[in-house]
Image: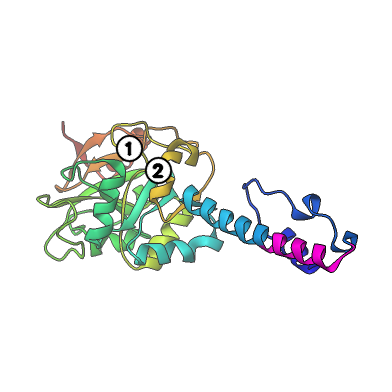
Amino acid sequence: MISSVKAVERLPLGSYSFKRLSLRCPRVESFSSPYQKRKFAGSLRSRISQNLKGLDMGSQAKGGVVLPATGDHVEEAINAITAEQVIAVPTDTLYGFACDACSAQAVNRIYEIKGRKQTSPLAICVADVSDISRFAIVDHLPQGLLDSLLPGPVTVVLRRGESSMLEKSLNPGLDSIGVRVPDCDFIRAVARGSKSALALTSANLSGQPSSVSTKDFEDLWQHCACVYDGGMLPSGRAGSTVVDLIKPGIYKILRPGSAEEETKAVLEEFFFQEVA
């Protein structure tokens, strides 16, 4: 019986309130009669069962497991994406909700979590600049332009084209798509491992301030398969700079974001002209 007490003491209790049984229960040797020992043993088994059940219920109620956004947890995140689940991840700008961009079920789940209208488009995230051509048309862009902008806090808007691997259910009615390659190893590793594009949007309720820490969207953790914590993000709440590069030789800033001046400087080096 003492071994049962020690087994309970070794349980990983996390943040739950659970007092060690050895502090509340007398030792078996202190009982003088066999009857007292049997009664105590039955009581202890009941307490163990109740407390284990309480731990399980507590973990379910908490929802949205939070893990560090490190290489040790990339495989778990990839598994969640391929299982058509939604995860929360850090980027080089804000925290975002991510899922498989080629899964209508997962994309719809993101809209539900955010309370966002289906008419509001989602961007996608890919692992490397070389992946962009799988999902959007880049033939009209000068060689080296995208590599000069990305990875970084920029969303480039391009035409999808008929050869795009994206599901038609993503942003229906639009022939363009915003594409990101964040300067963030974790989300890029997840995108690379999933062998797909990730639908990506800010981790917040629609119309609410964007999130620069996991605590900012704590009320939404329960809706995610997992929340990956990369600490406080330093870039502020401006988000990425969104630039329209659909037409050759011209660009339009759709959202100033956190890298507007740097984006303009790169585009002007390639002799692009800004349009209003």
Image quadrant where residue 155 sits: top left
Image-based side of 118 in relation to 126, left or right: left
What secondary structure is the magenta-colored segment mainly?
helix
User: Mark 2: which secondary structure?
Assistant: helix
Q: Residue at x 48, y 55 (%)?
A: 185
Pick the front one: 165 or 43: 43
Label of residue 205 in the image? 1
Q: Residue at x 84, y 68 (%)?
A: 34
Q: Which residue is mark 2?
A: 220
Percent across and percent down for residue 234 are: 50, 36
Label of residue 103 in the image? none
Vertical position of residue 220 compared to residue 109: above or below: above
Image quadrant where residue 21 sits: bottom right
Vertical position of residue 253 compared to residue 228: above or below: above
Q: Residue at x 18, y 45 (%)?
A: 118
Q: Amino acid at mark 2?
A: Leu
Image quadrant where residue 260 sits: top left
Disc 1: CA contacts within 10 A as few (<14), some (14-19) or many (>=20): some
The reply to whether the magenta stretch includes residue 232 is no
